[in-house]
Amino acid sequence: MPSETPYHIYVHTPWCRSKCPYCDFTVYVDKNPPYDEWTDRIVRDAQWTQKQAKWDLEGPKTLYFGGGTPSLLPINNLQKVIETLRTPNTTEITLEVNPGDVHPEKLQQYKDIGINRLSLGIQSFDRTQLRRLGRGTTPKDIHQLLMWVQQANFDSWSMDLMFGLPNQEFQQLKDDVNKMLSVEPPHVSLYGLTYKKGTPFFRALRSGSLQPITENEWVKQFEYITNTLKSSGYTRYEVSNFCKKPHQAQHNEGIWKNEPYIGLGPSAHGFWPNGIRTQYSSTWQEWISSTVPQIEECTTEQRAIDWLITAIRHHEGILLSTLNRMGYTLKVPKHIREHDTFSKSLDCTPTRWRLSNHGWIVVDWITEVLVNALTPIDKSV
């Protein structure tokens, strides 16, 4: 891979104290997690992948520890993985942290081993909603963590906030937003609640014991949060991500720009520079005993689709020359192009298509339209 091409490493830490009822991620609840086995396997898989894919020897631009709950990992295990993967070329190392898992001494240990960015799983400041979400933390835990993180002076940190919660009143949402802004997070990630098949929330929805908010209420909440963030000095650089410059998440932005990455850990995905995609098993026994991940060689069309899906979510949008180099163009049927929703949702120039303010709300529909409009360039013409 050319030295100027950045790449990233995502490390999945699968353990949680309990599994949230809305979560469909690969998560294990284990009183005695086999951290050392996990660490050794992560290191071995990283070395195998770097050798197989002929990764740039300068090393990854970012490391991201997601989960699960990476803040449950012992410091020595984290340190071993970081020391194996990090190089002088690595500029951002992010760790997801939950309230109640850390204290000032542990935050300092994180900084000592090279972690320079935290992603805080706050979700809500409301006690009732925290219980409903199965978070196992209290508003006191949250405020204490925020105070400690501010005092620790990391290079950057982010806060997750959920909306569209069951029975969530608009005033509850406003209170959450006000409390979030009062601590001035450098970065904010929004998550609208979705009911994933197989989760307790999905079953409760089907049985009628859980009442979701209406679509109009969801849009009202989304627009309120995004408008409030904008008026408070935050820049929107992806559908659900906002920051005060220069606090864009380098790792996530790399993924949205379709830069290659190594995925390590149970269920983790990877995308190699030669178009190879990898995925590890989501079950512990299969993951720990397998020798290699599943490998899929993407077609030219699939690579174009993958790039399109991520590019449209980013504020820079779709650079048509990049799509052309992949051998494709966009041919949206006339009846759709003339539809009000389409015309209001995209700002189109001869060189770039990107979402308008209205487009952020209907990004899923726009994405479907664009994928269906993807057309190979006829090189015989």
Image (cartoon, rainbow, N blue to C red):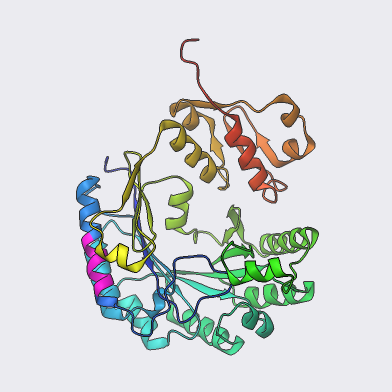
- Residue at 60% from the left image edge and 58% from the top image edge: 240
Q: Residue at x 55, y 71 (%)?
A: 159
Residue that lies at the very extreme toward the bottom in this rendered image: 140
Q: Nearer the viewer, residue 115 or 302?
A: 302
Side of 34 relative to 325 (left or right): left
Residue 244's spot in the image, x, y percent?
56, 62
The stretch drawn in magenta includes residue 228: no
Measured as percent of width and height from the top left, residue 180 is found at: 63, 75
From this view, report whether residue 179 is shown above or below residue 334.
Answer: below
Is 358 located above or below residue 376 in the figure? below
Question: Residue shown at 69%/75% (left/top)?
Answer: 178
Determine whether, in the image, residue 187 is placed left or right of residue 268: right
Assess whether residue 41 is covered by the magenta stretch. Answer: yes
Task: Name the quadrant containing residue 23.
Answer: bottom right
Identify the residue at image location x=50%, y=16%: 378
Our reading of the magenta stretch's main secondary structure is helix
Please give the range of residues in magenta.
Answer: 37-44
Relative to 34, does residue 278 appear above or below in the rendering?
above
The quarter of the displayed image where residue 139 is located: bottom right
